[in-house]
Image (tube, grey):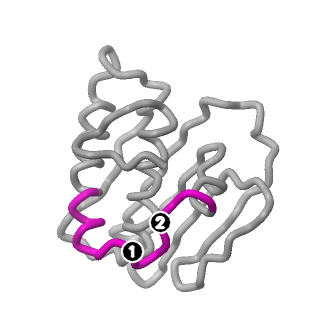
Amino acid sequence: MKNCFHILILLFTIIACSTASKNTVAANSPVKPNSAVNDTVRIANDSLEYEVIIIDNGFSTWLASMALPRNYYSLSYLENKNYLYVTEWNNRVLQPQRYSPNLYEMTIDYQPNIHYGYEVNYLIYNYMIYFQNTYKQKLGGYVPIR
């Protein structure tokens, strides 16, 4: 894809659940909670040429059960928090001697001058909250405990 925004977060810290089912979500379709255990959340929008893939055991279940509902936060709030979290995340990727390379495997290409829309920002924000609470990390500022 031209000028593709591609975020790929691979955190395989728990290999035991690698055979669980996968969940695919298109950005243009409503997200429906699924009762099955899901490992993958995918958001794609061909018109903006971006794709977000989040692979982490337990995130889909956490998102359906613990995350605050969509539209709880404003878009500007999510964009500001995501910029803060992603900047710190990328700094940690560049310091593997200080931060676990098993947690921070690759950088995230999140550019504040691109309008990704509410759904992408909502899922990135909630993944960052999930990540910080699950792996006892603090990427900056107040982290809601859920």
Residue 116: x and y in percent read 34, 74
Where residue 57 sits, quadrant-wise, is top right
Q: Amino acid at mark 1?
A: Tyr
44 sits to left or right of 83:
right
Residue 146: x and y in percent read 49, 49
Residue 79: x and y in percent read 26, 66
The residue indicated by pointer 1 is: 72
Residue shown at 65% from the left, 46% from the top: 58
Please tell me which residue lies in front, 75 or 90: 75
- Which quadrant is the N terminus positioned in? bottom left
Instruction: Looking at this view, name the residue that lies furthest to the left.
Output: 113
Q: Residues within 10 Å of mark 2 (few under 14, many from 20)?
A: few
Q: Which mark is residue 20?
A: none
Q: Amino acid at mark 2?
A: Leu
- Tell me if label 2 and label 1 are in contact, CB under 8 Å: yes
106 sits to left or right of 35:
left
Q: Secondary structure at mark 2?
A: loop
Residue 102: x and y in percent read 49, 26
Where residue 71 sits, quadrant-wise, is bottom left
Q: Secondary structure at mark 1?
A: loop
Q: Is residue 34 above or below residue 136?
A: below
Q: Is residue 103 above or below residue 35?
A: above
The residue indicated by pointer 2 is: 68
107 sits to left or right of 53:
left
72 magenta-colored: yes
Residue shown at 37% from the left, 64% from the top: 5
Count of labels in the image: 2
The stretch of residues the image draws in magenta is 65-81
Residue shown at 59% from the left, 51% from the top: 59
Q: Residues within 10 Å of mark 1 (few under 14, many from 20)?
A: few
Please tell me which residue lies in front, 140 or 111: 140
Q: CA distance from mark 2 to mark 1?
A: 7 Å
